[in-house]
Amino acid sequence: MTNGTGLRERKKLRTRRALVDAAVRLIADQGYEATTVAEIAAAADISTRTFFSYFPGKEDILFADIGARVAALVREVSGRRPGETLAESLLNAIEHAVASPGESEFTDELPSLRVRLILSSPPLLTRALYWVFDAQRQITVAVVDAYGDEIDEAEASAAVGALIGALVNTAFLKLARGAAVEDVRAALRQAARVAIDGLADVGAGTGAGNRSAQRGAITP
């Protein structure tokens, strides 16, 4: 049973990669608007119906790996270690994501090509902004849940927004210029450290709960 399940999962991953590869290359050749789901499915040697069992629509295929990456970041933040500050938690989560990219459908030159396609297509750029917003929302909720009374929602939102903004901007700039994957990873680590340097005191016992106590101590 285990071997059979493993084979099925590997076959599904190969099909997803074939769809992503076909979509990226077709869109690069003929443009996003001119490329149809039927063409992408045919290039990956599957039916149009099967395509929709992998992706909701054409606009989602270039973001095939984003959901899993965001879920991994949420798990890392949710698994906060005792005494770990918010800065430490976020940096550990990013380091894990950068060091362990997982089974991404985007290999070789595809990440750079994907970014160039997104930047050149308003519908894809709109979808990218949706994913950025959704990632920030999910991670912010995880931070608030993990840190309880130590941090309020405004601090969590600002901290996560600064970090995700730095990472997205760095990745887009580097990949749009054709940087190698290892160079992008190094730049992401650097961007994360710069963004997180300003968070050292956030979630370190100076958050919402302690501030409330302090206000109570000085209120007549």
Image: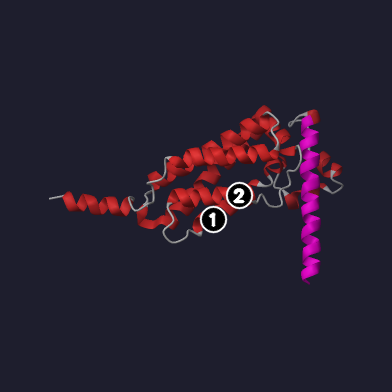
Residue for point 58% across, 34% down:
170
Q: Is residue 155 left or right of residue 140?
A: left
Please state the horizontal and vertical placement of residue 17, each as a whole percent of the image. Answer: 78, 47
* Residue 139: x %, y % from top left: 51, 49
Task: Quadrant for the N terminus, please.
Answer: bottom right
Q: Label 2: how many residues lie within 10 Å, few (<14), some (14-19) or many (20+)?
A: some
Q: Which mark is residue 76?
A: 1
Q: Identify the amino acid type marked 2.
A: Ala
User: Any magenta on residue 3?
Assistant: yes
Cα gap from disc 1 to disc 2, whole angstroms = 9 Å
Q: Identify the secondary structure beneath mark 1.
A: helix
- Could one spot residue 138 in this view of the protein? no
Q: Which residue is mark 2?
A: 97
Q: Amino acid at mark 1?
A: Glu
Chief secondary structure of the magenta span? helix
Dot 1 or dot 2, earlier in sequence: 1
Residue at 64 percent of width and 32 percent of height: 174
Query: Looking at the image, do the residues carrying marks 1 and 2 touch, with CB atoms under 8 Å apart?
Result: yes
Please say whether residue 30 is one of the residues in the magenta stretch. no
